[in-house]
Image (tube, grey):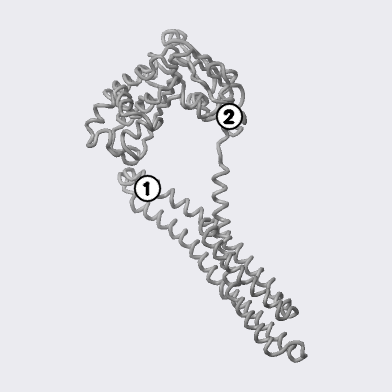
Amino acid sequence: MQTTLLTGLFDMAGVALTLAGILGMLFYLQWRLALFTFIVIPLLLGAARGFGREIQGISQRAQERVATLAVLLREAFSGARVIRAFVQEDREIARFRRENERTFGEHLRISQLIAAQVPVVSFLTALGLVAVLWQGGRLVTAGSLTAGGLVSFFVYAGLAVEPAIALSRFYASVRQGLAALERVLELTATSGDVRDAPHARDLPPVRGAVRFRGVSFSYDGGAAVLGDINLTVAPGERVAIVGPSGAGKSTLINLIPRFYDPTEGTVEIDGVDIRIVTRLSLRRQIGLVPQDTVLFRGTVRDNIAYARPDASDADVLTAARAANAHDFIRALPQGYATMLGEDGSQLSGGQQQRLAIARAVLNRPRIIILDEATSALDAESERLIQEALDRLTAGRTTFVIAHRLSTVRKADRIIVVDQGRVVDDGRHEELMARDGVYARLAGLQLVES
């Protein structure tokens, strides 16, 4: 697109002016003969259109091939250890080679078409010159045109050959640009369903009361994932959400920061429907600690201060201490200035999770969402992270998705979700006494322990 719109467009402006000047001179010298030259224009347009359509179609496929190639590369780099562990290097190299050759083939076909277009256009323009010479000879014989006039006309007509070829090349470039534009528009049109309302206002600082009123949700109009959820959480309350795999726990908490909007019902914070406030003002008051920690390329400090890039060093240090991360950060080669590689691969899982907690602490949210924040960790890492989470959630409304009984029992309330519905609500002892879904899940975990 850039090549077509910038370099090509400016070049074609000069070519178009040159061609316009040549045509003006042709009509000035002999308008009848100039009209005769227009016989070849439909042929030129037809050839350009045929080549252009084919080039655009192949360019679209080439764009898709490049995307597939990029996916293969990312999979190969991110899964390098798995590939080596299962001795599949040759297989991955073969996959890349096949896709690379297909991509090369598409681009080669485009180059061949552009190369073939030039002689075809040259032939058609030469045919037009022959037709002009033939018709001009007849006019000279009839006395309507002098021999000198014919030579002058023919010279100007010959000057139009090169601009005509340049225009045909530009048309092919435009069709390639259109293929790229369609690809870009395809991506930009894929916007999220969640948008700010036309007159959305900022959400003022909240106390943290969260309420689900008759909330139902389905993905893309399919089967309901959540059905008629009614739930009220008081400010500062710590709520654990438990249930079997696929029960809808993550979907439920993803409605709070408006990663999705409910299909029916409303989610309210401090009595305000979150759909009438801006997403920016809403999410700034919510802290998220996901199961899979996401770290960005940059320093340790940059990752902690991700939500508040202007935070002072003292604030970053305080957040790191609160997350039990200061000691291991200080032991790194450059401390807080240590550069992290892709996904923070030089850190352990527990260290990455503590950086994520420090990031949430620094953001000072009123509502905390913990999505399996202590899963798949050793006992020592879990102890450190649990201490950090206790500091993070103190006095804040907290939603915890967890399977570990030790984490769930600390909650003020336990919400049991099964098949998209809230089936029970209470403290650990109350739910165990009822011998329902929660008692069954707790029993399974006790057996595994």
How far separated are the C-alphas under marks 1 and 2? 34 Å
Residue found at x 72% / y 85%? 135
| Residue furthest bottom in the image | 141
Residue 76 tag number: 1
Q: In the rendered image of this protein, does residue 128 appear above or below residue 190? A: below
Asked if residue 274 can be seen in this view, the reply is yes
Where residue 380 appears, as percent x and y from the top left, is 26, 23
Q: Horizontal and vertical percent for residue 367?
A: 45, 20
Residue beneath disc 2: 218
Name which of mark 1 and mark 2 comes first in the sequence: 1
Q: Is residue 446 visible?
A: no
Q: Position of residue 337 (x, y in %)?
A: 28, 36
Q: Residue at x 63, y 70 (%)?
A: 47
The dot on residue 363 is none
Q: Position of residue 362 (x, y in %)?
A: 37, 25
**84 lies above or below 62:** above
Instruction: Give the residue displayed 57% in from the left and 28% down from the top.
Output: 261
Q: Please give the count of numbered marks on the rendered protein.
A: 2
Which is more toward the observer, 388 or 136?
136
Location of residue 226 by image quarter: top right
Left/right of residue 192 with respect to residue 39 in the rendered view: left
Considering the numbered disc 1 on the image, is that residue within a helix, a strand or a loop?
Answer: helix
The front one of 228 and 357 is 357
Disc 2 packing (10 Å; few <14; some 14–19; many ≥20): some
Q: Quadrant of residue 326?
A: top left
**Amino acid under disc 1:** Ala
Q: Quadrant of the C terminus?
A: top left
